[in-house]
Structures are given as structure tokens and as C-alpha cells.
């Protein structure tokens, strides 16, 4: 997690311009709160916590650094809201391989229905489901499966039909085993967050992965799991301390 991330978070204790030194840390967002995520990346790399941290954007990068170090052309971000957290989970659920859109070979209609249910579950009023035409870059009429993601800028759950060839598209044998273990151990049972975290840690084993994210959700009955795959593996858990089947 050393060196920052062009397409995720870069965490700094001192501003260095857009050429990150080796003492920076980062990776993909773990929650909707970049400041909390960067403090965790700092801890995982053995670095000092960022003093008086603030999140800002700079030339397309998402950065967390001391407030006094924000450059003149950096745009400081507001503190994350409940909608930000819901949108973050929406995106993870849409891209999830355990029981999300990537868990099966969803048709366009199936993906649209799933996205609509997720918007309702997350309480994301004002959001809509949009279908990106299959003839856009990446679409192929010979590929039967849809994919989907959240776009907070447009407040849309975007469905992209004809983007994957099968339910196992892009999954090697080890990743399929990981998916199946998370499905059987967490998604198909009702477990609390600590048990789910232990199960996920064991399932990940030596597989290269981004930090496991366990987010308390005391109002939930059971723990939910999302598995996102792209370059590496990211597992996110949300649930109560004690399950209520």
C-alpha cells in the first residue's frame, strides 16, 4: 500500500505535488470516508497518522494530507454524508461477485431490476437506473452478460449490457474458490461481523488483496458481503456485532 494510487486514494503527511514519494500510502477507497481510509493505509504501512487530515482533489487525484498542506488549486471535499455511504455500498453491490450483478450472467432486464431494488434498499431517492447502450466502447453483442456500477456524479446506477461472457468472466480458479467460500460462509448464512471477518480472512488466505473492510451496521440482521475484482481483490463486510436471524 506504499506509493499512493492514481485511481484511488493517495495519503500524505506532507504535500509533494503530483509525484508521490515512497513515503506516501494509498489504494482504493475502503469506505465513503477518505480521511478514515487514509489513516488506515498509514497504519498498515507503519507510517505516522496524518495530522489534521483533510481530503481534496488535485488534477484528478483524490488526496488526503494535512489541512495546512493543501495546495492553492486543490479542492477540499465536504465531509461524507449518509448518501455518500449509501452510494458507496450501491457501487460495491452492483459490482459484487458473491450475490450482486456479477454473481450471475444477468441480462439487461435482470441487471436493471437488481439495480432498482438496490436503490430502494439504500434509500437513494433522486437516483435513477440508466442503461448504457451496448454499442458503446466495450460492448459486444456476442457477450451475454451485463455489468453495472454506480455513478454519483449523475446519481445513476448504470447498467452496461453485453460486457461479460459468463458468470466466471475474468475469474481464475482461485478467485472462483474465494467467491464460493464467501457465498457459502457469509451470504447464505446469518453471521455477525466478527465471524464474517474471520471467515473472509481465512478465505482470502495468501491471495493478494486490498485491505479487508469490516463496517459496523448495528441495524442489520446479518452481515452482507461484497467481493469486487479488478487488478486485485477487495472484500467489504457490513453487519451487526451479533446476528439476529
Image: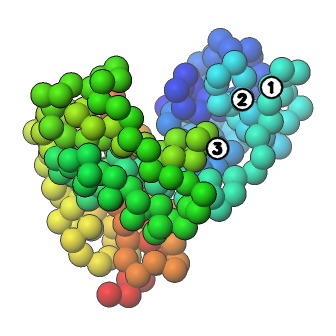
- The image quarter containing residue 12 is top right
* Residue holding disc 3: 34
In the depicted view, which residue is nearer to us: 23 or 164? 164
Q: Distance between the residues labelled 2 and 1?
A: 6 Å
Label of residue 74 in the image: 1
Label of residue 57 in the image: 2
Which residue extends farthest bottom?
244
Label 2 or label 1, whichever comes before in sequence order: 2
Q: How far apart are marks 3 and 2 (CA)?
A: 11 Å
Q: Is residue 77 above or below residue 17?
A: below
Is residue 242 found left or right of 77 in the rendered image?
left
- The image quarter containing residue 38 is top right
Contact, mark 2 vs mark 1 (Cβ under 8 Å): yes
Q: Is residue 126 above or below residue 139?
A: below
Using a 10 Å C-alpha cutoff, classify the residue at mark 2 as few (fewer than 14 neighbours), some (14 to 19) or many (20 or more): some
Residue 130 picture location, percent across and down: 44, 44
Q: What element carries label 3?
A: helix
* Residue at point 89%, 32% (across, down): 68
Residue 219 picture location, percent across and down: 51, 80
Is residue 237 found left or right of 217 in the rendered image?
left
The count of marks equals 3
Q: What element carries label 2?
A: strand
Locate the C terminus and report the quarter of the image it occupies: bottom left
Amino acid at each position: 500500500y506504499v506509493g499512493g494510487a492514481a485511481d484511488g486514494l493517495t495519503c500524505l503527511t506532507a504535500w509533494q505535488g503530483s509525484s508521490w514519494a515512497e513515503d506516501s500510502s494509498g489504494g482504493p477507497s475502503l469506505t465513503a470516508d477518505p480521511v478514515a481510509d487514509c489513516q488506515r493505509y498509514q497504519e498498515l504501512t507503519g507510517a505516522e497518522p496524518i495530522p489534521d487530515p483533510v481530503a481534496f482533489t488535485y488534477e484528478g487525484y483524490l488526496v488526503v494530507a494535512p489541512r495546512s498542506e493543501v495546495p492553492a488549486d486543490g479542492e477540499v471535499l465536504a465531509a461524507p454524508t449518509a448518501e455518500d455511504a449509501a452510494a458507496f455500498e450501491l457501487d460495491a453491490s452492483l459490482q459484487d461477485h458473491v450475490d450482486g450483478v456479477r454473481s450471475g450472467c444477468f441480462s439487461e432486464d435482470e441487471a436493471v431490476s437488481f439495480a432498482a431494488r438496490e436503490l430502494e434498499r439504500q434509500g437513494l431517492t433522486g437516483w435513477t437506473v440508466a442503461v448504457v447502450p451496448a454499442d458503446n466502447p466495450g460492448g459486444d453483442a456476442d457477450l451475454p452478460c451485463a455489468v453495472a456500477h454506480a455513478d454519483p456524479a449523475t446519481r445513476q446506477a448504470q447498467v452496461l449490457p453485453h460486457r461479460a461472457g459468463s458468470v466466471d468472466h475474468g475469474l481464475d480458479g482461485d478467485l472462483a474458490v474465494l467467491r464460493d467460500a464467501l457465498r457459502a460462509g457469509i451470504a447464505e448464512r446469518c453471521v455477525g461481523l466478527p465471524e464474517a471477518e474471520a471467515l473472509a480472512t481465512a478465505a482470502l488466505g495468501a491471495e493478494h488483496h486490498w485491505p479487508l473492510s469490516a463496517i459496523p451496521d448495528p441495524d442489520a440482521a446479518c452481515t452482507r458481503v461484497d467481493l469486487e475484482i479488478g487488478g486485485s481483490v477487495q472484500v467489504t463486510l457490513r453487519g451487526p456485532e451479533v446476528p439476529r436471524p
